[in-house]
Amino acid sequence: MARARSRKGADDGRLLNFWAPPDSAGLAIGCVATTFTLDAGHFEEQCLARFISMETDPAESARAYLIEREEKMSQVFACVLVDQRHAKDLRSLRWHMLPVRLPGSAIQHAKISILMWERQLRIVIGSANLTPAGYRSNREVAAVLDFGPEEGYPLKLARDCIDYVTKLSRLVEGAEDTPGPRAALNAFLADVRHRISGWEESAPQAGAARCELVSVMPGQSTSQGSVPAQVGALWRGPMPDNLVVVSPFFDQSESTADRTYGELSKLITNRGERRIDFYTSGRRLADGKVEVDIPSRLYKSPLRHPKTEHCISIIEDAASSDGDAQRPLHAKVIYLRQESFSLFMVGSSNCTVAGLGLSSTPNAEANLVFVMPANAAKFDERCWEAIPEAEDVTDEKDLLFKATLDASDDAGAAIALLPPGFAEALFLPKGTGGELQLTLSPDGVPSAFEVYLPDGRSVLSPDRWLKEFSRSSQLTLGVDRPISGLTVKWKDAEQTWQSALWVVNVTDTGLLAPPDELRNLDLEDLLAVLTGSGPMYRLIDSRLEAKAERQALSAPVVDPLKKVDSSQFLMRRMRRLARALEGLRARLEQPVASIEGLRWRLQGPLGPVALAHALQVESGAGAPFFIAEVAVSLQEVRWQCGNAIKADERESALAETLATLKGLALEHAQNSPENLREYVADQLQRIAS
């Protein structure tokens, strides 16, 4: 039953690469990911940046990065579901952060990412959290599933993953039927289901490995919904004689170790020789002893059958590619085999009762199982190579068992959990500021607390809640800028002050005001960008840089020719506007993959409405004429929405834009010459008809 330990190519994969679009995937539509711990900066600057094909780097040009991010993020949906304990970072409101609270000590521990492009769906299931450690240094393992219109993994697997995330989202505070992140997430998942519904089902290949989702969710029956029960139900043929368990974390009590061992041992045969291999972190000491991070109770279980051989393989921390950071084990694997059949499970479940779904309050976990017949030997070997290289401990007398933290603590010290009374916080954008809409459950709010804005100002305390809001469960507070998180401080049962972030999400990302770099563009900026060549974020960055340099120099103009601003001459401005309208039309005719993207193109800072406002400010009596020309140009756009946007949605967005343009043109036409008023009225009448 010994296995060859070939590790060729085992570490060739880079998880971040799988966030980049495959060839011919098309435009990014949206993504949703689940994680236990989260680094918001890593998710945004590494994962999301690859997903939407960002070209700029915040370390090289923060302004260009901000402009490009705004342009691309405004056209996609993005969301992370994170365990409530680790929802602690401020971020851009362009993507949603949804804290998941499970009953008791259970945690949201699943790591599953659903990435949707126009012509490709990718699902990543594994052990890595959305953190630099998870994606760059830890020893992790993940499975990547690609689905396409004509080929890929079976679509049932994709639907199972979508259903799992849908169930997980129901553990998030907030309403589904009013504008907000939960409604937006439901709409995105429904859109993914709709997009793949017309794709061709892939026929299973004879003898190929098949995949199944094995998940854990609070409320599932431990007899049928636990990981061992689900894995056992997938096995076919004679019982396996070898079980391999890879886990960095274990329960420490005797009762939980016995429960875990008892359920896992049921997966292998009770006849003849059998073997259980435990792969875990460990280290060889100077005296030759081997310290292993596994409880002795699990290895020396009283439930062990006399003919069951136990083996331990240690996976030592190794230096990362930069030679500095260590690479601790974080992978989780269950591997079953016998001569004609094998099964390989990868995912988030540690070897604990909560992780395996054996407790009354299990974690939320997601795992993928590959079921492999004998003629899938090559794929079986690839699965085996995914296990980090290990050293067998051949002499049991060398073992030193070390107690390790349970899985619920694998991120470090205990973190204060936001009291449940602080339910949902939403930001409703209004201009450059907006309103905070707070939902509190009075029974779950501590008697002593304080809520602070990011700048340190207090906005809510027990006294203010009583005097100004009569302890209402629905509060509205005005703020002068977008807010992505509030700091809550409170006294716990021991009268010790604790602190946690109260995550704020936006009601509608389409209402967010663009940053100053885009909001303050004048007419000359817009004309230059729309008539220029190259990425718009590079053009805007260059213009803003040039403006800043001119203001810094502020030298007086002495050349009499340069004192004359010829750009204001009517004929020259008409020619420049004509070229700008061609650029605008070309921009609008680029493929668009979502209704959010179309609205951004029409209503955003580089769209026809922004151009009309700039013309209104800087074109004087000729503004109605120029704005009418902008409206007319929209009639000539050849839209490339494909099946991504319904015709009525596109027409509604276009009608809203045209109505805005007409209103702006007519607003100032009253003070224009009669012939100009007649021309504008005629043009607008043509649009209406």
Image (cartoon, rainbow, N blue to C red):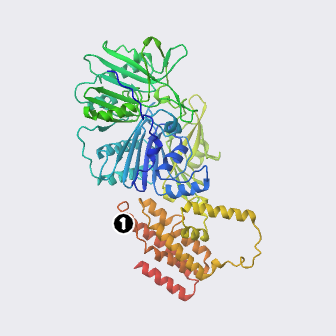
Is residue 301 toward the left or the right of residue 470 in the image?
Answer: left
Mark 1 residue type: Asp
583 or 382, nearer to the observer: 382
Mark 1 nearby-residue class (10 Å; few <14, some 14–19, many ≥20): few
Where is residue 18 shown, x and y percent of the image? Answer: 43, 45
Quadrant occupied by the N terminus: top left
Residue 599 locus on image (x, y percent): 46, 63
Q: Using the rendered image of the protein, determine whether residue 472 is visible from the camera's viewpoint.
A: no
Residue topped by disc 1? 648
Q: How many marks?
A: 1
- Is residue 150 shown above or below 104? below
Picture residue at 48% right of the left edge, 29% below the top? 329
Counting from the top left corner in percent of width and height, residue 597 is at 45, 60
Q: Is residue 396 left or right of residue 519?
A: left
Residue nearer the viewer, 110 or 127: 127
- Asked if residue 459 is positioned above or below residue 234 in the image, the reply reads below
Residue 301 shown left or right of residue 510 in the figure: left
Q: Position of residue 681 (x, y in %)?
A: 48, 83
Residue in the foreground of this view, choosing between 331 and 151 = 151
In-front residue for pair 149/171: 149
- The image quarter in which residue 518 lies: bottom right
Residue 568 figure quarter: bottom right
Q: Is residue 501 above or below residue 184?
A: above
**Could you tell me if residue 483 is visible in this image?**
yes
